[in-house]
Image: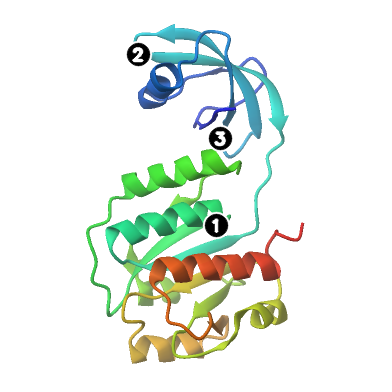
Amino acid sequence: MIRLHVTSPLAAAAAVAPTLDQSRYLTQVMRLKIGDDLLVFNGRDGEWRCSIAEVLKKGVILRAEEQARPQVHGPDLELIVAVVKKARVETIVEKAAELGARRVRLVLTHRTNADRIRLDRLDAIAEEAAEQTGRMDVPAVDDPVKLDALLDGWEAGRRLMFCDETGGAPAMSALRDAGEGPWSILIGPEGGFSPEEGERLRSLPFATAVSLGPRILRADTAAIAAMTMWQAAVGDWER
């Protein structure tokens, strides 16, 4: 069944107005008509079965019929990734949504050299991935900030999985030893972190430096590998 992310509140008999683009998708691409059903979620009120109540010139109106699933959230995992080329950033955001990241934070490092970032495009990619994978929220994608500024304002109690291309503990065992709780995963730029950045990261009491294996991975591959290891070691894959 079609799934759609909306911003409207969801409750029994509530009227829901998708965006114009979403309305066109439902009626012109998927050829839905009045009375047809779809699933809708907003990240707050669970997943609802809705029916098309009206088809208007400027969009459609949905009616919420019944809750299909109560609201649930995955583990508190952030992906922090240095800005790289546009196509790779888009892949990273898509896979982060598929693999359960709650948030994607973009950072600028000493060796960042990348294309201009369009947050609206990344938000749309994250939303589509959430719709297609059955998750009930959409990960936020943040504006790029400097790595030093991000570390200066680090959230108390959150651990950092620092993927260190120069060497670190085996990821799975290091994660299990560190335990559950709020985590962030940090992926560096093409060419890796500068020596100064690496030294600071390794000195942080909340950081766990890990190795992703004997091969140097590109940023998008490293992000997928790291999130997979994290989910398997301390995430929700075993639940």
Q: Is residue 141 above or below residue 172?
A: above
Q: In the figure, is residue 147 to the left or right of 138?
A: left
Q: Is 31 or 155 nearer to us in this picture?
A: 31
Q: Which residue type does callout 3 highlight? A: Asn
Q: Residue at x 50, y 57 (%)?
A: 96
State the image quarter where residue 42 is shown.
top right
For mark 3, give the secondary structure. Answer: loop
Q: Quadrant of residue 217?
A: bottom left
Residue at the image point whose x is 35% and y is 90% from the top: 196
Q: Is residue 86 visible?
A: yes
Q: Distance from label 1 to label 3 (Cα)?
A: 17 Å
Q: Return the x and y of residue 21 as percentages of the image width and height.
A: 36, 26
Task: Please name the residue that numbered disc 3 is placed on.
Answer: 42
Residue 121: image x %, image y %?
A: 33, 45
Q: Is residue 65 left or right of residue 16?
A: right
Upstream in the sequence, badge 3 or badge 2?
3
In this view, the residue in front, 152 or 24, is 24
Q: Residue at x 55, y 83 (%)?
A: 210
Residue density around tag 3, few if under 14, some if 14–19, many if 20 or more, within 10 Å: some
First of labels 1, 2 by sequence position? 2
SS for tag 2? Answer: loop
Q: Amino acid at mark 2?
A: Lys
Of callouts 1 and 3, which one flags the residue occurring earlier in the amino acid sequence? 3
Q: Which mark is residue 101?
A: 1
Q: How is the image coloured?
A: rainbow
Amino acid bearing label 1: Ala
Residue furthest to the right in view is 239
CB under 8 Å between callouts 1 and 2? no
Q: Is residue 20 left or right of residue 223?
A: left
